[in-house]
Amino acid sequence: MSKVDLHVHSLFSDGTDSVKEIIAKASKNDVSIISITDHNSLEAYNELNEIEYNGKIIVGTELDCVAYGINFHILG
């Protein structure tokens, strides 16, 4: 069975790891599909051209939106 993590945050939002560290951890833990979903940002994907990863990367972001005075986080 494949390991998948579709909700990862980098230093470009409120995460603690750089993009390079995220990819290294995914590789070490045999995670075959990841999505870096920083809050309202796609900046992490600018660094991926410099990093090798044998798994699949799904481009994503976590969008903040407010409706009826409630803040919602939506993965996209």
Image (tube, rainbow, N blue to C red):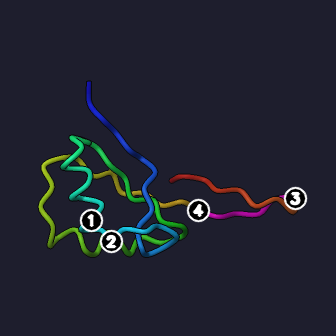
Asked if the residues shown at circle 1 and circle 2 are in contact, with their CB atoms under 8 angstroms apart, the answer is yes
Q: What amino acid is found at the position of numbered circle 3 in the picture? A: Tyr
Mark 4 or mark 2: which comes first in sequence? 2
Query: Between 32 and 26, which is closer to the camera in this rendering?
Result: 26
Residue pointed to by mark 2: 18
User: Which residues are drawn in magenta?
Assistant: 64-68
Q: Crowdedness of circle 1 by 10 Å Cα count: few (<14), some, many (20+)? A: few
Residue pointed to by mark 1: 21
Mark 2 or mark 3: which comes first in sequence? 2
Q: Position of residue 57 (x, y in %)?
A: 27, 52
Q: Crowdedness of circle 3 by 10 Å Cα count: few (<14), some, many (20+)? A: few
Residue pointed to by mark 4: 63
| Relative to 6, residue 72 above or below | below
Asked if the residues shown at circle 2 and circle 3 are in contact, with their CB atoms under 8 angstroms apart, the answer is no
Q: What amino acid is found at the position of numbered circle 4 in the picture? A: Leu
Q: Crowdedness of circle 2 by 10 Å Cα count: few (<14), some, many (20+)? A: some
Can you tell which of label 4 and label 1 is closer to the viewer?
1
Local SS, label 3: loop
Q: Position of residue 29 (x, y in %)?
A: 24, 44
The disc at residue 68 is 3
The rendered magenta stretch, by its main secondary structure, is classed as strand
Q: What amino acid is found at the position of numbered circle 1 in the picture? A: Glu
